[in-house]
């Protein structure tokens, strides 16, 4: 068993996607889900299970990153809605999902984890990870 008390943690052992921005506290990864371009995760750099395990200043810092990523996704992807989720049932490591949603996406209006409602192509909505990283940096400057 590892020092954190867990045998394995996917988010401790791998980046969890294409890293587009990172700090000592967290990293932002582009998930690479073809049906949901711009789908990102904000992942804590160390293993903690819950947001309230973080000291208050780090909670605020993490939320500022989350807001900056949302701002960047909205700017680049122009979605109809952004879904924010911090589930961690399968991976008990602090992380947030930021999922751009469109009225014509596969699952709308249901969550992306539900049964698909339609077949659709999101190829016209693909985004560049470097551009997303630049947008995140710009958004962090204004928080």
Image: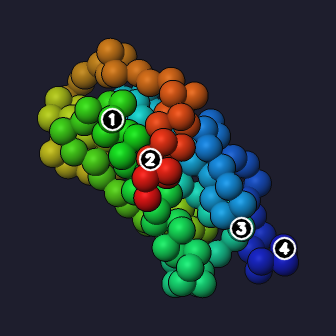
Question: Where on the picture, by quarter, is residue 53?
Answer: bottom right
Pointer 3 residue: 46
Q: Would you place residue 97 above or below residue 37 in this image?
A: below
Q: Residues within 10 Å of mark 3 (few under 14, many from 20)?
A: some
Dot 1 or dot 2: first in sequence order is 1
Q: Residue furthest top?
A: 124
> Which residue occupies the foreground of this view, 52 or 86?
52
Dot 3 or dot 2: first in sequence order is 3
Dot 4 or dot 3: first in sequence order is 4
Q: CA distance from mark 1 to mark 4?
A: 40 Å
* Residue at 62 percent of width and 44 percent of height: 21
Q: Are marks 1 and 2 in contact (CB under 8 Å)?
A: yes
Q: Are marks 3 and 1 in contact (CB under 8 Å)?
A: no
Element at badge 2?
helix
Q: Which label lies toward us, 2 or 4?
A: 2
Q: CA distance from mark 4 to mark 3?
A: 13 Å
Q: CA distance from mark 2 to mark 4?
A: 36 Å
Residue 50 in view (yes/no): no
Is 57 on the left or on the right of 127, as rendered? right
Q: CA distance from mark 3 to mark 1?
A: 29 Å
* Residue at 35 percent of width and 57 percent of height: 84
Pointer 2 residue: 139
Q: Are marks 3 and 2 in contact (CB under 8 Å)?
A: no
Q: CA distance from mark 1 to mark 2?
A: 10 Å
> Which residue occupies the foreground of this view, 124 or 113?
124
Pointer 1 residue: 75
Q: Which label lies toward us, 1 or 4?
A: 1
Point out the image quarter for the N terminus: bottom right
Q: CA distance from mark 3 to mark 2?
A: 24 Å
């Amino acid at each position: 068993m590892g020092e954190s008390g867990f045998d394995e943690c996917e988010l401790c052992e791998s980046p969890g996607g294409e890293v587009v921005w990172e700090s000592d506290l967290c990293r932002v990864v582009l998930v690479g889900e073809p049906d949901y371009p711009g789908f990102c995760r904000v992942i804590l750099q160390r293993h903690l299970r819950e947001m309230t395990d973080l000291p208050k200043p780090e909670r605020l810092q993490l939320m500022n990153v989350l807001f900056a990523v949302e701002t960047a996704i909205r700017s680049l992807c122009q979605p109809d809605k952004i879904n924010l989720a911090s589930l961690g049932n399968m991976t008990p490591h602090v992380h947030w999902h930021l999922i751009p949603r469109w009225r014509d996406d596969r699952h709308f209006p249901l969550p992306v984890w539900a049964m698909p409602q339609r077949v659709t192509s999101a190829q016209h909505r693909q985004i560049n990870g470097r551009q997303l990283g630049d947008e995140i940096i710009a958004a962090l400057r204004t928080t």
